[in-house]
Image (tube, rainbow, N blue to C red):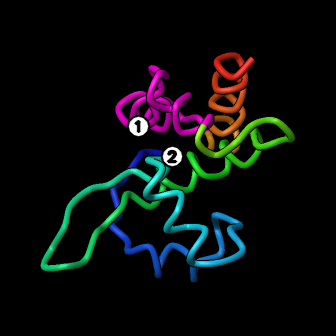
Amino acid sequence: MAYTEKKVTIKELFESGKTRELSIKALRSRAEEGVLVFVETKGNINYYDESISIIRVLAARKCKRPGIRWKDISKAYTNSDFEKEKIVHLFNQGKTEADIIQQMTNHLNAILL
């Protein structure tokens, strides 16, 4: 499956249910923590990359456990070489969303340990 960028608002992302976040407030927190991938602002509305943000949130949720705070996961993303370009490259190589989530989870867990 080739990657195609789709821009969404936090509200649209939450309403899709794909991130499995329990509230829009929690999803906004993920955006503030740098887990969502920001694309642009138009007027006063922020847009995020739908596919990449979903993958990053789901991988982060798999890493969340006792003793690991969202702040720790955010820092792991900052220290990671798993940038948007790498995820796009994996999509374009034919990797599935599940494959990428698992690879990213393994990568983040290695940083968090």
Q: Residue at x 58, y 41 (%)?
A: 71
Name the dominant secondary structure of the magenta segment: helix
> Where's the C terminus, which quadrant?
top right
* Residue 95 in picture, x, y percent from top left: 59, 35
Q: Nearer the viewer, residue 3 or 75?
A: 75
Q: Residue at x 50, y 48 (%)?
A: 35
Q: Secondary structure at mark 1?
A: helix
Q: Residue at x 70, y 42 (%)?
A: 69
* Amino acid at dot 2: Met
* Residue 75 in picture, x, y percent from top left: 52, 31
Q: Residue at x 21, y 61 (%)?
A: 40
Q: Secondary structure at mark 2?
A: loop
Q: Is residue 16 magenta?
A: no
Q: Nearer the viewer, residue 67 or 40?
A: 67
**Residue 1 numbered mark, or none:** 2
Judge from the rendering whether residue 102 lies leftward or rightward of residue 66; answer left or right. left
Q: CA distance from mark 2 to mark 1?
A: 10 Å
| Vertical relation: 52 (above or below) 29 | above
Q: Which residues are magenta?
A: 72-95
Mark 1 lies on residue: 88
Sort mark 2 into few (<14), some (14-19) or many (20+) by Cα contacts within 10 Å: few
